[in-house]
Structure formats: C-alpha cells, structure tokens
Image (cartoon, rainbow, N blue to C red):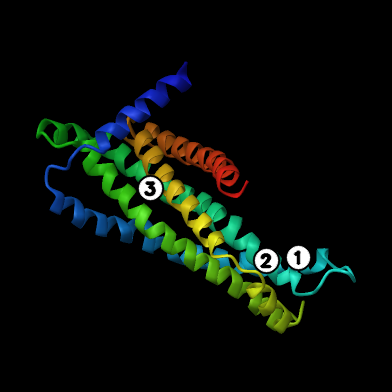
Amino acid sequence: MNFLFHTGRYFLLLVQILKRPENPSIYRKQIIVEMDYLGLQSLGIVSIISVFMGAVLTIQTAFNTEHPLLPIYAIGFATRQAIILEFAPTIVSLILAGKVGSRIASEIGTMRVTEQIDALEIMGVNAAGYLILPKTIAMVIINPVLIVISMFLGILGGYLVSLITHVMPVGHYLYGILFDFSPFDIFYALIKTVVFAVIIATVSGYYGFYTRGGALEVGQASTKAVVMSSIYIILFNLILTQLLLA
C-alpha cells in the first residue's frame, strides 16, 4: 500500500509540474542556471570516470579474449559496444543520480522544512513547477551532451591504454572501433539517457518536495532519492533494452 501511495502521489506531482508556467521567461532563465549547476559542474567527474572506464574495459577485454580464432580488432569492437550501449548511458546516469539527485532532493527539502515552498504557494506560485520543471528540462538537455562526451572519452581511454601499454596494436583497436558501426546504437543510448534524466530530476524532486521535519529528514530524503532513482534507472534500463534492441 505504501508503494501505491507514493506512486499515486508521484504522478499527481507530475501533473502539477507540467501545468502552464506563470512567467515563462523566469523558467527559461532558471533552465540555463540549472544546466550549469546540474550538468556542467558534473563534467569533471564524468570525464575522469569515462577515461578510466574505457581504459580498464579495454585491458580486461584484451586479457579475457586471448583466442587464436578471435581477431584482435574484436577487442576494440567490444569496447565500443560496451561503452556506447551500456557503460556511458547507464553507469554515468547512476553516478549522476548520486551526485545530482542528492543535490536536488536536499535543495528542495531544505526549502520545504524552512517553509520557503509554503511561501511560494501562498503567493500563488506553482511551487512544484517552479522548482522541479526547470531542473527536469535542464537535465533532459544537458545529460545527452554529457553522455556523448562520456562515450568519446571512454573510447579515447581505450586508445590511450593501447598506445601506452601495448595491450593490443593501436591500429587494430581503431579498426575495431570503426568496424560495423551502427548509428542506431547512439540513438538507443540517447533515448535511455533522456529517460534517466527525467527519472533523476522528478524522483529526487518528489522526495525533496514532500520532506517533513528538519535537517535529519532532509538527509533521509536525499538518501531515498538516490536509492529510488538508481532502482528506477536499472528497471527502465531493462525495459528500454527489451523494447529497443529485442
């Protein structure tokens, strides 16, 4: 019953979020601000993780595919597919769920417990839309950019480790990266990214918006936001993979 309660209240909040803005120009300015806070400030950690992720994935693939019948370029091919289809969109989104999701939940939760949201509602402002909608739109816009950068840096990490450690010939790695490339793989990854961005922003916003109590409850709301966002990302990853690749 608790699950049904939260599900129903979540969808009611979505309806409230999607109501027509009172002043669209304010929302547009806020979207730009949120793109910086929630997206560009995460570029550093996304870059570092992506480079090392690609490097480690290349090394592990090389050491676990030593077979005379398997062409060497298959290592580059496997690295590319793993990064584009799964590691960049899903793993990076899970990382962002922890970094960005906790920030959204704690920010909105703090506004709730300090009665700032109550003040907005008294003034006739749609507090849910004003606080959550710009964050959601900002993440839908900026997250695919982060994921594309993550894909490039992951493949670059594999190239660098091949060049430095000679775990495989660089020429074979580059040939494997280009071998049988399908643009649909990028489209599939970006579709997942957009869905994950909506999940992170709205689920985190939900737990922050309905926080009650004080500082302790804000911390608990942040934790719940990260956990539930991660669970829904994994669940929808399975659903979207079945729908788009089956």
Mark 3 vs mark 2, foreground winner is 2
Report the side of 141 relative to 238 (left or right): left
Residue in the picture at 75% in, 74% down:
73
Badge number at residue 76: none
- Gap in Å between the C-alphas at discs 3 and 1? 36 Å
The residue carrying mark 3 is 103
- Gap in Å between the C-alphas at discs 3 and 2? 32 Å
> Could you tell me which secondary element the residue under label 2 belongs to?
helix
Q: Which numbered disc, 3 or 2, marks the residue that appears first in the sequence?
A: 2
Q: Are marks 2 and 1 in contact (CB under 8 Å)?
A: yes
Q: Is residue 51 visible?
A: yes
Label 1 sits on what residue type? Thr
Where is residue 243, by image quadrant?
top right
Badge number at residue 79: 2
Which residue appears farthest toward the left when viewing the image?
123
Q: Which numbered disc, 3 or 1, marks the residue that appears first in the sequence?
A: 1
Work out whether residue 228 or residue 186 is closer to the camera in this orientation and state it: 186
Q: Is residue 212 visible?
A: no
Relative image position of residue 170 (x, y in whole percent): 70, 82
Q: Are marks 3 and 1 in contact (CB under 8 Å)?
A: no
Badge number at residue 61: 1
Figure check: 7 above or below 133: above
Relative image position of residue 198 (x, y in whole percent): 40, 45
Residue in the picture at 41% in, 20% down:
5
